[in-house]
Amino acid sequence: MSDLNTLRDLLVRFRDERNWKQFHTLKNLIISLNLEAAELLELTQWKSDAELAALQSDEGFRQQLREECADVLHYLLLIAEDNGFDLIAAAQEKIRKNAQRYPVEQSYGSAKKYTELKQRARDGQD
């Protein structure tokens, strides 16, 4: 059993012991995921890249970062568990798909979306 499966099982047990599954509809889980992601984003609000780089060595900031990332992961695990898919397999599939969308020779060092990369390749601009 992978560590992620162990974590999922621990999380489901935690949820079920409290009878919270009744609140965990797909809509509510996705809303909660986004609220937690917003809390993660809030850690960076109004800070420059230099300020954030300095904060990465601050233990208080690192603790907040760990907790918000954990909350996001918890909701992702619950969404995947309730909808019957393996989150690791889904992530691996997405990496393979992105490797096709973003071939190294077109995307290396570029932040352009794959649709723009394809258009540039068709137009001969690479």
Image (spheres, rainbow, N blue to C red):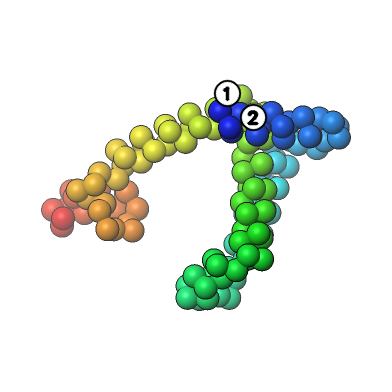
Q: Position of residue 94 (x, y in %)?
A: 42, 36
What quarter of the picture does the N terminus occupy? Answer: top right
Q: Are marks 2 and 1 in contact (CB under 8 Å)?
A: yes
Asked if residue 10 is positioned above or below residue 98 in the image, the reply reads: above
Q: Residue at x 16, y 55 (%)?
A: 126
Q: Residues within 10 Å of mark 2 (few under 14, many from 20)?
A: few
Asked if residue 3 is positioned above or below residue 74 in the image, the reply reads: above
Q: Residue at x 15, y 57 (%)?
A: 125
Q: Residues within 10 Å of mark 1 (few under 14, many from 20)?
A: few
Picture quarter containing residue 14?
top right
Q: Residue at x 56, y 70 (%)?
A: 55
Q: Position of residue 37 (x, y in %)?
A: 62, 54
| Viewer can see residue 121 | yes
Q: Position of residue 64 (x, y in %)?
A: 66, 60
Picture quarter containing residue 27?
top right
Q: Amino acid at mark 2?
A: Thr
Q: Residue at x 54, y 66 (%)?
A: 56
Q: Position of residue 83 (x, y in %)?
A: 63, 28
Q: Amino acid at mark 1?
A: Met
Residue marked by disc 2: 6
Residue marked by disc 1: 1
Label 1 secondary element: loop
Q: Give the Cα distance between marks 2 and 1.
A: 7 Å
Mark 2 or mark 1: name the one nearer the start of the chain.
1
